[in-house]
Amino acid sequence: MADDATILLDQALRDLEAAADEPAVEAWRIAVLGRNGSLNALMSRIGAIPTDERRAFGAAANQMKQQMEAAFAERNEALRRASLERETAQAIDVTLPGRPLAIGHYHPTTQIVREISGIFERMGFSVVEGPEVEWDYYNFEALNIPKDHPARDMWDTIWVSPEGPRAEKPMLMRTHTSPMQVRVMEQTEPPIRVIVPGRCYRYEATDATHESMFYQIEGLAVDEGIGLADLKGTLYEFARQMFGEQRKVRFRCDYFPFVEPGVDMSIDCFKCDGKGCRTCKNSGWIEILGAGMVHPEVLRRAGYDPDRYTGFAFGMGPERVAMLRYGIEDIRLFYANDLRFLRQF
Ligand code: YSA
């Protein structure tokens, strides 16, 4: 009987050692320690033992049971720990180098708008912003462009009001930043020196230098005694800081109903050095802004006395400035969301 017990214990401990996972250990528990298990089967044979040996047998069997239960608990714990270690090892490999974070940067337009704004800020201009959805009044009327005036054709307008320009109070996506000239003058007394960066929208057939959504930076200076020389001096200084001394600058007469006289300013084409190419439409020049002396009628509408105050204004295309600065051949690249292009800046 005692031999049977020793054999049972040895065998059971070997089986437990061989149980490779938690279900196998549980099966072992049922087979050995369970109600119908081998330990109980051994105990049930106590009746066949001589009375004087029963006490010793009972004590030995109990000790054996405790030994098996302890071995079971230990094996269970060892398996649980091993499986936890396996899972942890799969989830985190602390020796792996970290994944590099993708670090973004400002869009090239934002970069150039900030750079241009910085140049004018150093010349004493402050930066203001205005609404992209605008009233017809500020975009056209207050700028000396009444309804049905042919000059409206210069700006291919995207209307917000469903009836278009025939609405009672027509609303549109601003076609330029010039409406902010009027808004600023309505709210401020001279002297004024502001620049207004922001998006503009035109119903435009796009090409290498025209987008339907693009930026402009408006400039406005109003004070007593401001003349065309101040306009040219300011813009020359801007061109010198932005493009360097060697770049050629061209002023020509131009027409805008809200200035008198009006000019536009071009820079010689970076691509062909002024010889003529696709980017400059064979002209050798890339126009970057329209400008002029603020029309007396615009000053009067804004509540200023045009006999006392004069001013200059300009509207610049920062994408065109960036094209000249970085040698970008097509403005449509700016908003095509191609990271191969954007990552270069
Ligand atoms: C004129 C006189 C002033 O006293 C003040 C402002 C102006 C500019 C006027 N408001 C205007 O919008 N003129 S413009 O139509 O010739 O545009 C000015 C500049 O914006 C252009 O020189 C160009 O650089 C840019 N631009 C115009 N249309 C564009 C564009 N850039 C990209 N895509 C377009 N579709």
Image: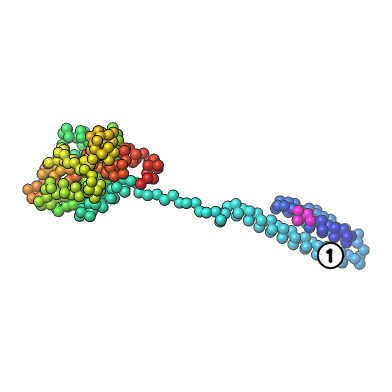
- In the image, residue 257 sits, relative to residue 91, either above or below, namely above
Q: Nearer the viewer, residue 170 or 90?
A: 90
| Figure disc tally | 1
Locate residue 141, reporting x and y percent: 17, 39
Q: Which residues are magenta?
A: 14-18
Identify the image quadrant of residue 64: bottom right
What secondary structure is found at the residue carrying circle 1?
helix
Locate residue 235, reporting x and y percent: 19, 47
Most frequent secondary structure within the magenta stretch: helix
Query: Where's ligand 1: which quadrant?
Result: top left
Looking at the rendered structure, the kind of residue marked 1 is: Ala
- Whether residue 16 is in magenta: the answer is yes
Q: Residue at x 13, y 48 (%)?
A: 229
Query: Is residue 184 in view from this perspective?
Result: no
Identify the image quadrant of residue 61: bottom right
Q: In the current view of this chain or complex, which residue is farthest to the right?
A: 50
Which color scheme does this rendered protein use?
Answer: rainbow
Residue to which mark 1 is pinned: 60
Left or right position of 71 against 91: right
Identify the image quadrant of residue 202: top left
- Whether residue 1 is in magenta: the answer is no
The answer to whether the beta carbon of the residue marked 1 is less than 8 Å from any atom of ligand 1 is no
Q: Residue at x 16, y 32 (%)?
A: 150
